[in-house]
Image: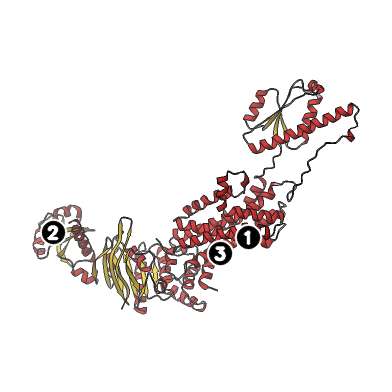
């Protein structure tokens, strides 16, 4: 049984359709990534799932409890980490986690060992007396995670948990999530704008304009790409891009640092590579496996083309 | 004990204590306001600066001026030698009144038809009206004295003479008409109301402004627990403020507390209901603490001016008097002034107490209905 279920969930703000007939289902032990650029509707989706916003239509259930009609039962199962740091900056680390432990119904004899266990788990056991406002960005997120986990939720919703966090701490953070999911069999939804993070999820949903435009495991999504990707080295990506776009069969070209990624129609790759050899300013064109980013961009572009019809 | 509620109260208390500056302001504001209003906002006009244009400069005119000097209403601040100087002094705000004694004052006094002119600066009606009655009274008393002297000189035994009519006035509760007696009970009401409404509104909105509401939403905290838990510490602070002002008002300014202290505290509790309700209501309409503060201010201003805090309700146009019926502070001021100054019991103030209670319940219920534990 799916622990998280959303059916035709819709929500608009004025003229903007933030979430548009969204369907979603996440099972125990699964990390589901909602991937999309800013304004795609990721945060609104999470807020609808925790009942912080009311949907215009559609419904959502958490562990079988309807979020609108059985709100309190549903929320008891949820751990939620919002995008903005939403703990009390003027309280200490321990006071923060204690507060959330208490209001989530942990008994006096239980909260202290549980809080210390979690603080140790996220590596904050030596900072219990520090004010939350004086923690670094990564430590704040870890405290947020610990507070969200304090009542052993079955559902974990993380809204861009690693945005603004340094790469090393990001690694830490992911290890924590993977360990806790493996140990407790939770269902996790996290949102991210980063493709390198998306790869770590079991399943992904690409979001655009409030809808999930593609869904599947990372490798399923990579397979969905129509066409192939050619990579070539260059030190003048912008000028080279102008040139390659004129070649027949090249559908799109994007610069990635000192490389250029060309998306070409299926079956035309070899013929394009032949022509690329004759261009100056680029070197060593070769076929590479598609990255998630290539897939995301390609899907977004074809969606845009579709919506203009 | 509801442990969620207790946790919220404890958390809120820690936050209040951590914010030392805000806490100091909350505790000092009432004392500051009390001293400001106790000393500055007084209608007892004294020492009005008076300009003197004595054209006669004779024994008789000096005797008249002595009469004015003797009463402490006026301070003979300037001696001038032309009407232009009087105008300049009054226009410059240096003198608020002037007395002009004509050159023939002594000769006409002998004939019995002397006149002196008294000029008042009417731009400040409060001090002008005090000066007006004081000027008349002092002049008439001096005139009576002169008449008695004349009669004595004419050989009449004035000991037998008596005024045919005498009005004996008795001022109850505040025989010396000290305006502090009127002001300080009012200050208690204003502080209680302002502090609870402002702090309730800002403390609830602060959770929204800082984003902490998002975490609270996903907890099983019930909306009423959130509200009660957040405001309880402020109710306690407001009660501390009440005792501060009562104690200072009583021991420093000498305002009597003739009625029951229990009744004062109980009715203050009723006023708190209204303050909390208005604060909570404002918090449901605001997204930032600043918006919340301004919303509360919109209700505070009419509360201060239409409650009878400064100006008597009887002096207001009928429309404003009707409007004042929906101002909770108005009822509280009647109660606190009656209980403190007259020693009234519940039997004489039950109507106001009931009105205060009803208003508090209505606004709290209305605010609670609007209050949602959601973002939209």
Q: Going 70% across and 57% down the picture, which residue do you hit? A: B344
Circle 2 packing at 10 Å, graded few (<14), some (14-19), many (20+), is many
Instruction: Count up the numbered dots.
Output: 3
In this rendering, the answer to whether A45 lies above or below B77 is below
Q: Are marks 1 and 3 in contact (CB under 8 Å)?
A: no
Is disc 1 surrounded by few (<14), some (14 to 19) or many (20+) residues within 10 Å?
Answer: many
Mark 2, chain letter? A
Residue B249 placement, left or right of A247: right
SS class of the residue under badge 2? strand
**Nearest the camera: B258 or B192?**
B258
In this orientation, does residue A225 appear?
Answer: yes
Which residue corresponds to mark 3?
Answer: B232
Look at the picture and state if A78 lies above or below B267.
below
The reply to the same-chain question for discs 1 and 3 is yes
| Residue A98 pos. (x, y %) | 49, 71
Q: Nearer the viewer, mark 2 or mark 3?
A: 3
Helix, strand or loop at label 3? It is: helix
Viewport quadrant of the N terminus of chain B: bottom right
- In the rendered image, the quadrant that contains the C terminus of chain B is bottom left
Q: Give how far apart the Cα atoms at labels 2 and 3 are.
A: 68 Å
When the figure is inspected, residue A295 is found, relative to residue B140, above or below; the finding is below
Badge 1 element = helix
Residue A250 is tagged as 2
How far across and down, in percent of the image, does residue B139 sit?
76, 31
- Say few, some or many: other residues with alpha carbon within 10 Å of mark 3 (under 14 / 14 to 19 / 20 or more): some
The residue under label 1 is: B267
**In terms of depth relative to the viewer, which is nearer, A239 or A214?**
A214
Quadrant hosting residue A68: bottom left
């Amino acid at each position: 049984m799916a622990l998280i279920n959303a059916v035709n969930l819709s929500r608009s703000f004025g003229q903007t359709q933030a979430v548009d007939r969204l369907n979603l289902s996440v099972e125990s032990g699964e990390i589901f990534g909602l991937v999309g650029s800013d304004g795609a509707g990721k945060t609104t989706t999470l807020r609808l799932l925790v009942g912080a916003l009311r949907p215009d239509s559609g419904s959502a259930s958490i562990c079988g409890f309807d979020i609108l009609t059985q709100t309190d039962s549903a929320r008891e199962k949820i751990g939620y980490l919002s995008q903005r740091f939403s703990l009390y900056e003027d309280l200490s680390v321990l006071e923060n986690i204690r507060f959330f432990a208490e209001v989530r119904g942990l008994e006096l004899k239980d909260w202290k060992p549980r809080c210390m266990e979690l603080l140790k788990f996220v590596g904050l056991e030596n900072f219990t007396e520090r004010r939350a406002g004086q923690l670094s960005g990564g430590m704040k997120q870890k405290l947020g995670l610990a507070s969200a986990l304090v009542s052993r939720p079955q559902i974990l919703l993380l809204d861009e948990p690693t945005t603004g966090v340094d790469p090393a701490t990001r690694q830490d953070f992911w290890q924590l999530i993977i360990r806790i999911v493996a140990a407790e069999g939770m269902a996790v939804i996290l949102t991210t704008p980063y493709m390198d993070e998306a790869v770590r999820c079991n399943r992904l949903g690409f979001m655009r304009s409030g809808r999930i435009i593609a869904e599947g495991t990372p490798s399923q999504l990579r397979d969905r790409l129509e066409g192939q990707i050619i990579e070539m080295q260059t030190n003048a990506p912008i000028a080279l891009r102008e040139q390659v776009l004129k070649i027949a069969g090249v559908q799109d070209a994007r610069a990635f640092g000192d490389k250029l990624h060309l998306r070409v129609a299926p079956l035309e790759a070899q013929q394009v590579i032949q022509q690329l050899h004759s261009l100056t300013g680029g070197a060593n064109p070769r076929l590479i496996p598609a990255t998630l980013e290539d897939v995301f961009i390609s899907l977004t572009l074809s969606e845009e083309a579709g919506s203009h019809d | 004990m509801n442990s969620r509620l207790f946790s919220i109260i404890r958390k809120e208390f820690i936050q209040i204590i951590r914010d030392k500056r805000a806490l100091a302001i909350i505790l000092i504001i009432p004392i500051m306001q009390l001293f400001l209003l106790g000393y500055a906002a007084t209608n007892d006009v004294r020492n009005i600066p008076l300009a003197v244009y004595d054209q006669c400069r004779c024994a008789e005119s000096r005797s008249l001026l002595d009469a004015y000097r003797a009463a402490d209403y006026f301070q003979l601040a300037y001696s001038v030698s032309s009407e232009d100087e009087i105008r300049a002094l009054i226009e410059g705000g240096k003198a608020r009144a002037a007395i002009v004694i004509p050159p023939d004052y002594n000769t006409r006094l002998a004939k019995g038809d002397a006149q002196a002119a008294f000029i008042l600066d009417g731009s400040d009606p409060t001090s002008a009206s005090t000066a007006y009655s004081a000027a008349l009274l002092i002049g008439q008393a001096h005139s009576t004295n002169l008449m008695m002297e004349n009669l004595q000189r004419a050989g009449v035994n004035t000991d037998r003479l008596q005024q045919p009519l005498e009005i004996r006035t008795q001022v109850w509760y505040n025989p010396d008409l000290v305006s502090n007696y009127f002001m300080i009970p009012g200050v208690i009401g204003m502080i209680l109301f302002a502090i609870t409404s402002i702090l309730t509104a800002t403390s609830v909105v602060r959770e929204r402004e800082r984003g902490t509401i998002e975490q609270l939403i996903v907890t099983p905290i019930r909306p009423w627990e959130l509200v009660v838990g957040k405001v309880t510490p402020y109710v306690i602070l407001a009660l501390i403020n009440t005792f501060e002002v009562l104690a200072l008002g009583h021991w420093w300014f000498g305002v009597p507390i003739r009625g029951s202290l229990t009744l004062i505290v109980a009715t203050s509790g009723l006023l708190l209901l209204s303050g909390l309700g208005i604060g909570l209501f404002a918090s449901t309409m605001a997204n930032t603490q600043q918006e919340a503060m301004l919303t509360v201010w919109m209700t505070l201003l009419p509360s201060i001016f239409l409650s009878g805090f400064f100006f008597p309700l009887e002096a207001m146009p009928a429309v404003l008097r009707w409007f004042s019926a929906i101002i909770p502070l108005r009822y509280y001021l009647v109660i606190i002034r009656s209980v403190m100054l007259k020693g009234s019991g519940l039997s004489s103030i039950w109507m106001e107490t009931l009105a205060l209670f009803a208003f508090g319940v209505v606004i709290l219920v209305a605010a609670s209905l609007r209050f949602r534990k959601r973002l939209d």
